[in-house]
Amino acid sequence: AGWFDAGGKRAEPPARAKRIHGDFHACAAYAVKSVEADHGAGVLVDLHGLSAKRSVDMYGYLVRGRELSAKEDGSRPTPDTALAKAIRERSSVRHAASRKKTDSEVASLVRGRQSLASLVDQAYSKLCPALTNAAGQPRGRPATPSARFPSPKESRTPDHDLVYFNGAYDIFAHSSRQNGVRVDSIQIETLPDARNTRAQRVRFAKCMATALREFLRLHYDLSIASPAKPAPGPAAPTP
């Protein structure tokens, strides 16, 4: 813990940086408390960007890459029982996990068909069918961990030999990782094609919103209506 410069060395930050850092976390803490007061529970999404060298998005829950893989070499996913234990004890989605009855249901939170990564993947396939793979099928939005790629270190997972980002301080400090907090947090690392152009950003936002509504319904019994379409403007005068 502490402050570091761009070269990775310990450094004393300027007063302005400390103030911005403090303001950011104060706002995040206030948002978490507000969601708890208004809705009882919720999800905080900490959105980051990956470089073009990557092939899939990454979702982080404070669960280590090796905890998602049964072997150190990542040759297969971890059994549900072992993964569920890690999720219940020290993940950033402990609140949702506490609502589940079985180890399989808990493990599915991060790598099953009802995980947020999988729901986003499904939303892309449904809402953006023109985005296809080499076989001409809907490409979706591949990510790990998910139903498509359960373990970031499994040999068949793209980028399995690269660093897996399992979550930073933000989702540790502002999530159910802290006892008594009923808001879960998920760190999402996205590829450039989620943000480079306005069309990509709109597409990503639409699919993420669709997935989040379903995620909240499935795991928190929270219902969020789709935004209403804007009312049509006045008719143009007849010439």
Image (cartoon, rainbow, N blue to C red):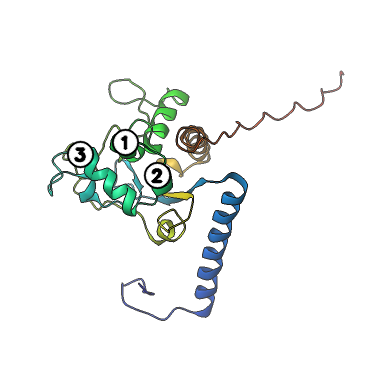
Foreground residue among 213 and 149: 213
Residue drawn at 40 percent across, 27 percent down: 131
- Residue 45 appears anywhere in the view: no
Left or right: residue 186 versus residue 202 is left
CA separation in Å, label 1 and label 2:
10 Å
Q: Residues within 10 Å of mark 1 (few under 14, many from 20)?
A: some
Q: Is label 3 in a helix, a strand or a loop?
A: loop
* Residue located 45% across and 49% down the image: 184
Residue at numbered disc 2: 98
Which residue, as the protein is rendered here, is positioned at the far top? 238
Residue 151 drawn at (x, y percent): 24, 41
For numbered disc 2, what is the local secondary structure?
Answer: helix
Which label sits in the foreground, 2 or 3? 2
Dot 3: few (<14), some (14–19), or many (≥20) neighbours within 10 Å? some
Tag 1 near tag 2, CB within 8 Å: no
Horizontal side of 226 relative to 59 (left or right) equals right
Q: Residue shown at 43%/59% (left/top)?
A: 170
Spatial separation of the CA atoms under disc 1 and disc 3: 13 Å
* Kind of residue at badge 3: Pro
Above or below, 82 relative to 203? below
Q: Is residue 230 above or below residue 195?
A: above
Q: Quadrant of the N terminus?
A: bottom left
Residue labelled with disc 1: 102
